[in-house]
C-alpha cells in the first residue's frame, strides 16, 4: 500500500508536470508573437511531452489503486523579453523539477516504496536530457547574438522537432 506521504508527493508532481506543460505552451505563444514559428514548435512539442509526464504518474497512481487529486494549476508567466530569456527560464524550471524528482525518489526509498522508485527511475534519466537540451539551445542563442540570419537558421532547425508519444501505461 502506498503511504500518504508518497501519495501526496506524486499528486503534487502531477500538478508540477501539468504546470510545466502550461509554461511551455505560454513560451510557444510568446515565440509565435515574435515571429519565430520553429522555436514555437519546439515549445509546443515540449508542452505535449510534459502532459505525457503528468499522465505517466496519473496512470501509475490509478494502477496502484490510489486516488488522483488534481489541484489548480498556478498562473504561468506569459511574456519574455527574448527567446534567450525564455530558454533560461525553461532551464531554471527543469532544474527545479529535477530536485523535486530526486526528493520524491528519496522519499519513496524512506517509505520502502520500491515500485514508486522504479517508476521514478524513468524521470531521473529523462531529467538529464530535460536540462541538457535547453542548455545547448541557450549556448547557441548566446553565440547567435543579434545575427538575424543565424537566428532564422536555428528557428528552422527547431521547427523540425516532432512529437513522439510517450508510453504512459
Ligand atoms: Fe517533465 Fe520537463 O520535465
Image: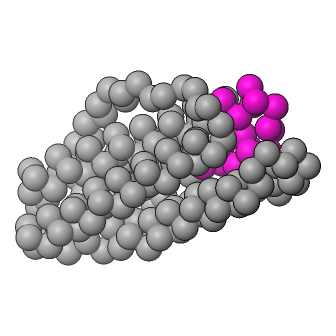
141 to the left or right of 54: right
Q: Is residue 154 visible?
A: yes
- In percent of width and height, residue 20 lies at 46, 42
Q: Quadrant of the N terminus?
A: bottom left
How many callouts does the rendering have? 0
Q: Main secondary structure of the magenta part?
A: helix
Q: Quadrant of the C terminus?
A: bottom left
> Residue at 26% of width from left, 44% of height from top?
12
60 to the left or right of 5: right
Q: Which stretch did the figure color magenta?
A: 30-46
- In percent of width and height, residue 108 lies at 17, 66
146 to the left or right of 164: right
Q: Indicate yes or no whether the magenta region holds residue 89.
A: no
> Residue at 42% of width from left, 37% of height from top?
19
> Residue at 31% of width from left, 48% of height from top?
13
Residue 153: quadrant of the picture: bottom right
Q: Nearer the viewer, residue 7 or 1?
A: 7
- In percent of width and height, residue 144 lies at 77, 55
Describe the colour scheme in one phrase: one colour
3 above or below 37? below
Q: Nearer the viewer, residue 53 or 28?
A: 28
Q: Nearer the viewer, residue 111 or 131?
A: 131
Q: Is residue 119 visible?
A: no
Outermost residue to the front: 146
Residue 31: quadrant of the picture: top right
> Residue at 68% of width from left, 55% of height from top?
142
- In percent of width and height, residue 21 lies at 51, 41
62 to the left or right of 43: left
Outermost residue to the right: 149
Amino acid at each position: 500500500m502506498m503511504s500518504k506521504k508518497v501519495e501526496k508527493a506524486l499528486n503534487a508532481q502531477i500538478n508540477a508536470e501539468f504546470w510545466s506543460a502550461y509554461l511551455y505552451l505560454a513560451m510557444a505563444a510568446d515565440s509565435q508573437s515574435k515571429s519565430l514559428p520553429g522555436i514555437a514548435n519546439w515549445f509546443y512539442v515540449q508542452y505535449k511531452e510534459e502532459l505525457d509526464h503528468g499522465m505517466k504518474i496519473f496512470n501509475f497512481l490509478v494502477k496502484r489503486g490510489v486516488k488522483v487529486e488534481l489541484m489548480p494549476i498556478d498562473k504561468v508567466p506569459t511574456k519574455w523579453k527574448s527567446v534567450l530569456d525564455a530558454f533560461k527560464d525553461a532551464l531554471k524550471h527543469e532544474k527545479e523539477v529535477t530536485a523535486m524528482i530526486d526528493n520524491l525518489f528519496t522519499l519513496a526509498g524512506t517509505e520502502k516504496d520500491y515500485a514508486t522508485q522504479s517508476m521514478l527511475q524513468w524521470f531521473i534519466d529523462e531529467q538529464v536530457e530535460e536540462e541538457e537540451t535547453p542548455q545547448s539551445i541557450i549556448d547557441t542563442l548566446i553565440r547567435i547574438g543579434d545575427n538575424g540570419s543565424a537566428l532564422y537558421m536555428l528557428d528552422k532547425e527547431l521547427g523540425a522537432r516532432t512529437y513522439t508519444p510517450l508510453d504512459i501505461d
